[in-house]
Amino acid sequence: DDRRAAAAAAAAMAAERPTIAELLELARLRKHEEVTAKLKLLPKEERREFKERVRALREAKQKKKELVSQYAEKAPVTADATQRARARVLYDFECTDGTQLALKKGNIVDVLSDEHDDWWKVSFRGDKGVAPANHLEMLPPADATTFVVALYQFEATKDGHLPFDEGDVLAMVDQQQGWMRGYKGDQYGRFPTTYVREQNDAERAAMKAVLSPRKNSGGPRNDAVRLGPSQSARYPTKVPMSARGAASDGGAAAAVATTASDRADAADRILLKRPVDA
């Protein structure tokens, strides 16, 4: 009888004994008192293993926090910028009146309005004005962008190069023949593929955390603005901001070119005015 009772007691204790995975889940849920009580049911070796795994998880969490903080400073685009339409400047533009905004090739601008086919309202470093649409090319949204990390410092030796320091994070738009094109901050340019590497999983997670849109953030998303003609083949056509405003007034049909011929005519008007890129 004593043996059966002891066996039954041992079996009951074994049934009540939690697994390390269960304790880790309780710790994640911040049920500290329950963790403390159930931890006493584990053998000494398993208690030690549990504490080591908790320590490792805390270290990993701290490293991720530090990486996110680091990326918040080095990210080529901010979380706020992901909520706005952005474009790169294809050619230098000198303004001729007070409504226009002077821009340089390679600048990255925020597109505030595209209601006019030929002129878009843009912002650059706090200044606002209009610029010719055929001087601008829409950038893909941040969640459709590949980010790379600089292995070495790169100094611009030619017009169109994008300089950066070792460890900088760059947004890569495309690549060909050993060179990439992309941007950092409000500047766009070319850089050699051998000077950068892909992000690892931890860096991608940190970048995702940095670029996560803030709650209740205002402003149009990058996919809310009409894409330029050179981008329309690469990215799905979206309803322009002007159409959204017209839709609220019941006039969306009049604001959007709904046929292929209408879109082609609009593209031809822009392409015919585009200056030759020397």
Image (cartoon, rainbow, N blue to C red):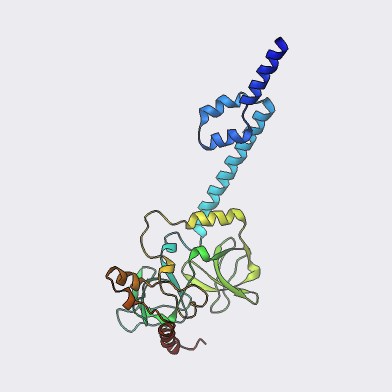
Q: Judge left or right: residue 55 versus residue 84.
A: right
Q: How many marks?
A: 0
Query: In the picture provided, is 244 more to the left or to the right than 31?
Result: left
Is residue 116 or residue 136 the one in the foreground?
Answer: 116
Which residue corresponds to the image point at 42% horizontal and 60% vertical from the top-left?
Answer: 80
Q: Quadrant of the N terminus?
A: top right
Question: Relative to the observer, which residue lies in front, 177 or 8?
Answer: 8
**202 in relation to 132, above or below:** above
Outermost residue on the top side: it is: 1
Residue at 28% x, 71% y is 250
Q: Is residue 249 above or below residue 11?
A: below
Residue 108 seen anywhere in this rendered image of the structure = no
Q: Provide residue 6's location: percent of width, then percent of height.
A: 69, 14
Query: Residue 54: image x %, image y %?
Result: 60, 36
Which x, y percent locates residue 63? 57, 47
- Does residue 11 appear in the picture of this structure? yes
The residue at 30%/82% (across/down) is 97
